[in-house]
Image: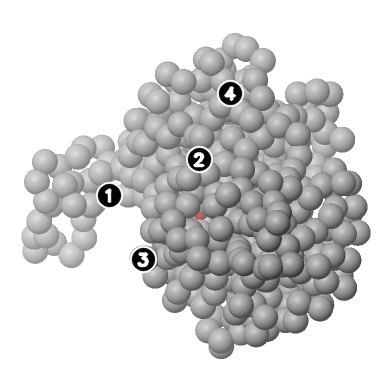
Amino acid sequence: MFEGKEIVLGVCGGIAAYKAAELVRLYVKAGARVSVVMTAAARQFVTPLTFQTLSGRPVFLELFDPAREQEIGHISLADRADLLVVAPATANLLGKMAAGIADDLLTTTLMACKAPRLLVPAMNSNMWEDPICRRNVVQLREFGVQIMEPATGMLACGWEGQGKMPEPQEIFDLTRNLLGPRDLVGETLLVTAGPTREELDPMRFLSNHSSGRMGYAIARAAAERGARVHLVSGPVERAAPAGVELHPVISAREMHDRVMALVKDCSMVFKTAAVADFRPACRHAQKIKKGADLSLRLELRRNPDILAELGRLPGDRLLIGFAAETEHLREHARRKLEEKNLDLVVANDLTVEGAGFGVETNVVHLLYRNGKEEELPRMSKDLLAHRLLDRALSLRQTGTFH
Ligand code: PMT
């Protein structure tokens, strides 16, 4: 897949710049040709000689280079790229790109490039969480720029949180999918994501911790691979991935109605949403006031089981459910697969570190209708999304998993 491909790798100034050297090695080993563009700040962390030695090519540093200017550096780099990756990408780079500033070789190349662009941010967790940075990420994603979620852990600055550059092998695996075939052209996917909210009164609701990350990653990956994607999403704080049709909903019943209206045209369904099984029996028109009682009894009613209803529909669409469990993972997941008539259930154990709600990674166990099972190692939800799409295609083509 990488054989003969031209990868332009931008390196910004951050401590993770040293990891970009390993990324170059992986690309070169896989047969790609790599041109490295370094910002001035990147050169404070790693020397151009490191990248020149590993890539076997000159490293590009200056916007105006008299030795090369007959070919207009940034245009020729942008034109030659099959893929442009920036790792690490700093908050400064994200901000400049979102604002349309092109004032050095890397930012001009990024703007002139028509090939897929992947940014791999790495920064202090407070910077990553800052609303300005969040806005820039949302905006860039809306413009179709791929942004990999940073990993969580101990950062070089001493803070603990989200902001670490993912390991080079993970970046390499994700870029494999960006260079890969558009193997979902012609498919229409229905993906559900996020939590549902079941209102109790005008200011309170029952819900859960789903952030929407897993479902949005599947929707994004499917769109990258050429599918038409309907994303039915409960309330989450994230923007629709580029090219995806977003259908926002609040409650389980709204999700049910939207899904049922869309499903007949869909060839694959990924039911990733964490749907509330129950809702308050009545929604109070006014705020419930506390009286003298020390307890309050709430009556709940069952919500429709959307997935079970999908499983009863005729047709040969692929139905993939999720199971979030805190004990007896495989037993509970297999029961769901059978009761809801699924082709595949993706089971995540909420007690495992790096799995389930909120986090940017997941650890899943796949259970297939034919009795087979597969355990996947911890990986980013972005990468897992592609692995699940691979499995879905394989099920479609062979009726079994490979
Ligand atoms: O959003 P993130 O923070 O990234 O977290 C991801 C996730 C943990 C939400 C996701 O990986 C996951 O496990 N989603 C399913 C959670 C869940 O509700 O599991 P469940 O075991 O309660 O439901 C089983 C399946 O039935 C799910 O596919 C669910 O969408 C579906 N269901 C459940 C209840 C209901 N009334 N209708 C349904 O369709």
Of residue 129 and residue 112, the one placed in the foreground of this image is: 112
The total number of labels drawn is: 4
Does mark 1 have its CB less than 8 Å from ligand 1?
no
Q: Nearer the viewer, mark 1 or mark 2?
A: 2
Dot 1: few (<14), some (14–19), or many (≥20) neighbours within 10 Å? some
Q: Earlier in the sequence, mark 4 or mark 3?
A: 3
Q: Residue 16, image x and y in percent?
A: 66, 76
Q: Earlier in the sequence, mark 1 or mark 2?
A: 1
Dot 3: few (<14), some (14–19), or many (≥20) neighbours within 10 Å? few
Q: Are marks 1 and 3 in contact (CB under 8 Å)?
A: no
Q: Nearer the viewer, mark 2 or mark 4?
A: 2
In the rendered view, tell whether residue 182 sits above or below residue 32: above
Residue extending farthest bottom: 158
Q: Which mark is residue 131?
A: 3
Q: Amino acid at mark 1?
A: Phe
Residue 389 visible, this orientation: yes
Tell me what residue is drawn at x 84 percent, y 65 percent: 57
Quadrant housing residue 35: bottom right
Relative side of 140 to 11, left or right? left
Residue ID for mark 4: 188
Q: Amino acid at mark 3?
A: Pro
Q: Residue 321, image x and y in percent?
A: 60, 36
